[in-house]
Amino acid sequence: MNKTIMHINYAEVTFHSYGKSSLDDVCRMAAEIGFDGIEFRGRPPIELKEMSFREYAAAVAASCKKHGLSEIMFSIGLAGCLDENREAREKCISDAIENARTVNELCGTTLCNSLGKALGSPIETAPDEAYEFHGSAIATPRQWEMEAEAYHRVGRELEKLGMRFALETHMYHIHDQPQATKRLVDLISSPAIGVNMDYGNTAYFPNRPTVEDTIDIYGDKLFYVHMKNSSAVPGTGKRIATSLSDGEINHRAYIEKLREVRFDGPIALEAPRDGDRTHFAKQDFEYFKTL
C-alpha cells in the first residue's frame, strides 16, 4: 500500500514558517489526521533557523517518533548545480550528499524530493506566469549537461546509502514539463535519480499530456507523487487553487492509473492555498482516502 505523506506546507502559515506552532505540533497534527509521514523542507523553518541541519534532522526524527510517523522525507535540492564558480558548485553537490547521509542516518529517510536550479527567461517581456517560456525552454545545452552531471554524482553516493532522489516537476526548472523531466532523468542515468510527478504543477502548462500519458512517460522512473488541484479562470489564462476534490484534475482517474502500473511509492498531498491549512489537510486527506 502507498504511504500517504503530508507536505509540510499544510503546517506553514507562510513559506518556511510554522508561525506559533512547534515542530511537535506539526507532527501531532499529521498523525492525528492519519498521515504516515511528512515531507519537510531541506533547511530549518524560520523559527528554528539557529539550528544546524543535523540538529534540525535530529529534532524532526524525535518528534516523528513521538507521534508514530514512520515516513520522514525531506526536499534536498541542488540550486547551485549550474554555478560557473567551481568552488560554489562543488559545495552545492557535497552539501546535498552530506544532508542525504544525515537524514538517512538520523531519520531512516530513503527517498527525498529534489529541485535543481530555477531558470527564468532572459527575455524581459516573457510573462512570469507563462511558465512555458522559462525552465527547460531556455536552458542551454551546457546547463542540461551540468545539471545531469551534478545529479549523476549525487546518485552514485545515494546508491551506496540505499537512497533515492525524485526530481519534482516544477515551473522554472529544467525538469518542468513531463518530456523535459524524463529527458533529464535519462541524461542523469542513475538508478538513484527519478521523478516526483507533481501534475498539479504540470496543469499550469499549455498543451500538456494527460495524467495517464504522463505516468506512461515516466515509466519505472516514477518514484514519488505530489497531489494538489486547481481550475482555470476563464478568459484570464490564470488558475485558482482548489481542494484536492474540486479542481480539474480527476484524482480518481489518476489513482486508477497509478494502480494499473502498480506504482508502490509514497503519495504526498499538498496545500497550494492560504487559509485554514489544518482544515484543508483534513479535507484533502478524507477525500484521498475515499479513493
Image (spheres, helix red, strand yellow):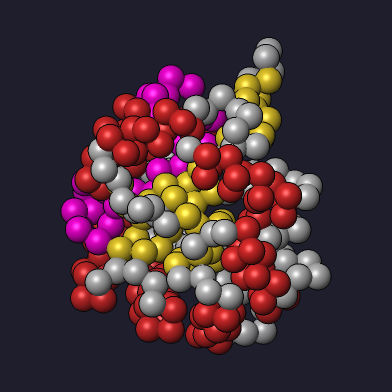
Image label count: 0
Which residue appears at 48% of the width and 33% of the height?
251
Which residue appears at 50% of the width and 27% of the height?
250
Magenta stretch? 185-211
**Position in image of residue 63 (x %, y %):** 59, 79
Residue 198 counted in the magenta span: yes
Residue 183 counted in the magenta span: no
217 lies left or right of 199: left
130 lies left or right of 208: right
Does 211 appear above or below 101? Answer: above
**Position in image of residue 96 (x %, y %):** 40, 71
72 lies left or right of 143: right
| Residue sitting at the far top | 235
Which residue appears at 40% of the width and 36% of the height?
255
Does 16 appear above or below 177? Answer: below
The quarter of the displayed image where residue 7 is located: bottom right
Q: Is residue 144 visible?
A: no
**Position in image of residue 62 (x %, y %):** 55, 84
The quarter of the displayed image where residue 147 is located: bottom left
Q: Nearer the viewer, residue 131 or 283?
A: 283
Q: Nearer the viewer, residue 123 or 172?
A: 172
Q: Is residue 50 visible?
A: yes
The quarter of the displayed image where residue 107 is located: bottom left
141 lies left or right of 189: right
